[in-house]
């Protein structure tokens, strides 16, 4: 399996996934070696921290709780077991390129989507007219929060358990919580991203939290309807050294 590359460099890949039919379907698509971490319930005492829109459905709140709890659970595992060089993936993350992470010493996004830096209401225009004009250098980039913000915690690299500890403590010190990725972005707790993104987020079926988006690759959305269509139309994936199971 191509993802065995990570083992050669003593990297650990944890995949957060629900123990249900949706999770099972998504895990069948994963094309790299990983350790499955089952989603866990959020401690009741932390639910009071969350801020939701007034019309947020209860099932969507549960999805947010589960995602947040899962990431905290894996971070705690990394810290307790002092594990370095870890990638935490969500179960819709597909490996499309082999990253060179040996010199990356900061927590770094390996996938995600860029958005308007200030106003969600202006994001549609941002995606249409601005997103494609934002350029990144090959390798690790500093996130420019003045030009864009990001969403999506589908794949994040943690170089050391000490960095994971810093992030964990920062999260626990924040009084009001939101979606895990939105909290990290709004608080600027992650300040680097890797380009080209080693992972694409292939969210074609039911989402645990929000409406399915399709393919998110290189921090933009690409409107393909199947994995086959991705490989038939996307040169960067057709030429990739990895394959889908």
Image (cartoon, helix red, strand yellow):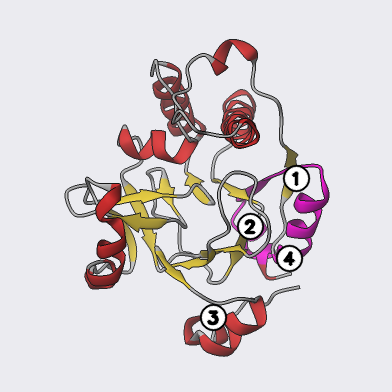
Secondary structure under tag 4 reads helix
Q: CA distance from mark 4 to mark 1?
A: 13 Å
Disc 3 target residue: 237
Q: Earlier in the sequence, mark 4 or mark 1?
A: 4
Question: Decide: marks 2, 4 in contact (CB < 8 A)?
Answer: yes
User: Do the CB atoms of the residues marked 1 and 2 lie less than 8 Å apart?
Assistant: no
Check residue 26 for magenta coloring. Answer: yes
Rendered-image quadrant of the N terminus:
bottom right
The residue singled out by tag 2 in the image is 92
Tell me the element at label 2. loop
Quarter location, residue 231: bottom right
Residue 82 visible to an observer of this rendering? no
The image shows residue 166 at horizontal and vertical percentages of 41, 26
How many numbered markers are drawn? 4
Magenta stretch encompasses residue 27: yes
Task: Indicate which disc, 3 or 2, sits on the residue closer to the N terminus.
Answer: 2
In the image, residue 118 sits, relative to residue 67, either above or below, namely below
Kindly report the distance in space between the C-alpha atoms of the residues bearing marks 3 and 2. 16 Å
Marks 4 & 3, CB-CB < 8 Å contact:
no
Q: Which residues are magenta?
A: 3-31
Tag 3–tag 2 contact (CB < 8 Å) = no
Q: Is residue 139 above or below residue 21?
A: below
Mark 1 against mark 2, which lies toward the viewer?
2
Label 1 and label 3: CA atoms lie apart by 25 Å
Q: CA distance from mark 1 to mark 2?
A: 13 Å
Name the residue beneath numbered marker 4: 29
Q: Secondary structure at mark 1?
A: strand
Residue 40: give x, y in percent of width and height. 71, 29
């Amino acid at each position: 399996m191509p993802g065995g590359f990570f083992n050669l460099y003593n990297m650990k890949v944890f995949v957060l996934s629900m123990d249900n039919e949706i999770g099972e379907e998504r895990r069948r698509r994963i094309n790299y070696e990983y350790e499955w971490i089952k989603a866990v319930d959020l401690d009741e005492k932390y639910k009071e921290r969350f801020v939701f829109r007034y019309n947020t459905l209860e099932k969507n709140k549960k999805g947010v709780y589960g995602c947040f709890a899962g990431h905290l659970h894996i971070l705690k595992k990394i810290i307790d077991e002092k594990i370095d060089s870890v990638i935490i993936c969500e179960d819709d993350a597909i490996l499309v390129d082999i990253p060179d992470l040996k010199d990356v010493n900061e927590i770094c996004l390996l996938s995600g989507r860029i958005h308007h830096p200030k106003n969600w209401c202006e994001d549609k225009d941002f995606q249409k007219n601005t997103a494609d004009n934002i350029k990144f250098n090959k390798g690790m980039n500093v996130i420019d929060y003045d030009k864009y913000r990001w969403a999506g915690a589908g794949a994040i690299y943690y170089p050391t358990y000490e960095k994971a500890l810093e992030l964990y403590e920062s999260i626990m010190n924040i009084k009001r919580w939101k979606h895990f990725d939105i909290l990290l972005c709004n608080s600027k707790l992650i300040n680097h991203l890797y380009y080209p993104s080693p992972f694409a987020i292939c969210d074609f079926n039911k989402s645990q939290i929000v409406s399915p988006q399709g393919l998110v690759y290189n921090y933009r959305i690409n409107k393909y309807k199947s994995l086959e269509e991705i490989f038939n139309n996307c040169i960067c994936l057709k030429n990739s050294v990895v394959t889908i199971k």
